[in-house]
Amino acid sequence: MSSLKEKPTAATFDVEALVAAAWNGEIRVPHFQRGFRWAREDVRRLFDSIVKGYPVGSLLLWERPAVQQQVTLGALHFDAPATDAAQWVVDGQQRITALANALHPSGQSDQKFALSYNLKNGKFISSPPTADPMVIPLPIVFDLQQILKWFARYPEIAQHLDDATSVTKRLRQFPIPAYVVKQGSPDALQEIFDRMNNYGKRLKRAEVFSALYAGEESKQDETLTIERIGQGINVERQFGTIDDDTILRAILARRGPDVTRDIHHEFDDGKEGRDAAFKAGEEALLQAVKFVQEKAGVPHFHLLPYRFLLVVLARFFAHHPDPGPGGLEVLRSWFWRAAVVGPYIFRGSATGAMKAQTYKILPHSTEESLRGLIDVVERSEHAMPNAARLRTNEGAGKIILCSLWALGPRDFLTGDTIEQPRLARVIGDSNTAASAINYIINPRNVGSSQRLSASNRLILSSEKYPANEIDSLISNQPIHLGDVEWELVLASHAVNRGMAQLLASGKVVEFLRHREQIVQQNLQDFLSEMCGWKFDSVEPLLDQLSAEVDSGMES
């Protein structure tokens, strides 16, 4: 276990000196640190505590050299010179970043840091869009000369000058205790970082893992990280950004079926290094994403019914990269059966569902792995999603959306099929696929019994059509589209001519009722085929795989 050769020395920094050091590049953030996670309210409470004299916790800094580099600290970007005694933040990054940004004019461009002091009630508030003499932006409050200029500009508030300058003094002179480590290995500092992660906003498991196995600071630009794995897969597949914890679980699942194991000793046995594990995990996860898109019909991460399915697939493809056409069909059947069943047969636990299935994947046998997966998720018709309820953040809703995507939705004006890149572009950085899933009728104009129905949603993936004109797109056939082509366009959205006429006549309730029936039938047909229920196709495929294995052994 790593240890420190010298005890940390105690020091105290006032806020004025601390932010000056941050702005000058004397304070650096190690690459194993997490990004800024505080919300605006966290930043506001920090400043409220400072002016009230409340303790805000101590810092842990690691004094060591730093090269000249471009530094990013929250919304601030600047060139930092080389120094022999930079202060690297081991604990306190959120507080230092908040102070450095909220008190710097450039930090005001980020809404998390755009705070002002309200002279009316002595509170810190979000900066208003227009100037108010009684509401002073923090960068001005922090600078005594700027405060005096502010009051010269607004003489009508002169009676508040003492209050404002008092806040300035308290901000600038507020002492923050710190411990400074002047010697120590990166391993020791990363271990300290891990042990301290339960202060403030607790780290996610992927953040702890990234900190523990960050690699060398000097190689940070070329080291594969969890974040870079997600970015790379998104660039290559336009799948959206997979969350860090799912990527971590995929890396772990490849190496062993228990993805909940203690990560602090992951590479202690020396059989595989960190970089090799990340690279192999990336390859397995990429193959899982390809399968999901090309074979299972899930175009985007936000249409993936459950994230744990990617983890199971990553383990499978890590050990069985080429299961053959029959094996891929069985795997597709498992995927959709698992999606329909969800985590509910495992007492509602996605972690339980994931572990139950990762343990079924045996490195030595593709056939046994597939049989094991199928055995875990027997058909459960009771879990069939209901088209009467579609929420884009629920597993059942995502299954419904995938069944609608399978219809090959077309653009109402051009007749062109909506391609996956267009879907990905419209979803962008959103947390759900909602931005690509249009309402046909404004939900405020729909009865409560149909308000959540899938009958009122379609995949148009376009921002060029006003939200209140989707119904008219369905009701009016463009003059440049022939009858046959127009019927294909309507069918691609689970609509027919008769239903379009209902909508044109203002019979919204009847339209939605008919479309819900079609959406539900399409969903059942989709799952029947994808799950292998329609022709009971899984067992023959497994028997065929078994025969192929036996034949290979005989030859």
Image (tube, rainbow, N blue to C red):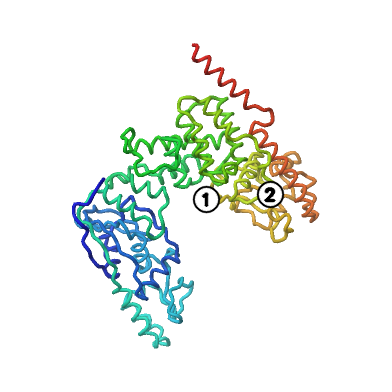
The quadrant in which residue 337 appears is top right
Q: Residue furthest front?
A: 347
Residue 354 in the image: state x and y as whole percent: 51, 40
Which residue is under mark 2? 454
Residue 334 in the image: state x and y as whole percent: 58, 33
> Residue at 38% across / 43% down in the picture?
263
Q: Is residue 435 above or below residue 311?
A: below
Residue 474 in the image: state x and y as whole percent: 72, 49
Residue contact between numbered discs 1 and 2, judged by CB atoms under 8 Å? no
Residue 341 in the image: state x and y as whole percent: 61, 40
Q: Amino acid at mark 2?
A: Ala
Q: Nearer the viewer, residue 364 or 90?
A: 364
**Neighbours of disc 2 within 10 Å: few (<14), some (14-19), many (20+):** many
- Distance, label 1 to label 2, CA atoms, is 22 Å
Relative to residue 431, is residue 11 drawn left or right?
left
Relative to residue 120, is residue 453 drawn left or right?
right
Q: Amino acid at mark 1?
A: Gly
Q: Judging from the image, what secondary structure is the residue with disc 1 in? A: loop
